[in-house]
Image (spheres, grey):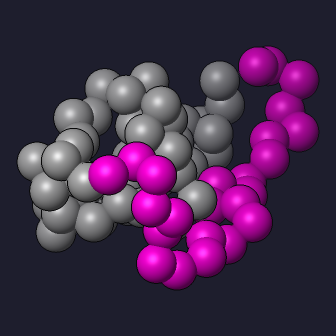
Amino acid sequence: MCLACEEQEYFFRVWCAGFLARGEMPPGVTEEDLTAMGFELPAALRSKDKSTPPATTAPAAANAFVCDSPDE
């Protein structure tokens, strides 16, 4: 992974952590994404009924950075 990708991943995790610290769900991120990153859902979000849609619509891509480095 190139340095730019590592930096983008780090800042994306920090961005998600900020929302979770406030007890909110980051826009455009699913519960499965958070679990894959090693985050726990806040208690307020865990007890919420899953059938209710989110109050706001999320942007198309929260993590729009794409690396064109051949390193991968």
State the residue lying farthest toward the left. Answer: 43
The boundaries of the magenta stretch are 49-72
State the residue lying farthest toward the bottom. Answer: 56
Of residues 48 and 61, the one drawn nearer to the viewer in this rendering: 48
Check the image and report above or below for 60 versus 55. above
Of residues 16 and 24, the one drawn nearer to the viewer in this rendering: 24
* Main secondary-structure element of the magenta-colored stretch: loop
Magenta stretch holds residue 65: yes
How many numbered marks are there? Answer: 0
Judged left or right of residue 54, residue 47 is left
Q: Could you tell me which quadrant the N terminus lies in?
A: top right
Check the image and report above or below for 38 versus 25. above
Judged left or right of residue 14, residue 47 is left
Residue 10: horizontal and vertical position, in percent? 42, 44
Magenta stretch holds residue 13: no
Judged left or right of residue 47, residue 37 is right
* Residue at the image point whose x is 25% and y is 54% from the top: 48
State the residue lying farthest toward the top. Answer: 71
* Residue at the image point whose x is 18% and y is 47% from the top: 47
Residue 34: horizontal and vertical position, in percent? 40, 37
Residue 45: horizontal and vertical position, in percent? 24, 53
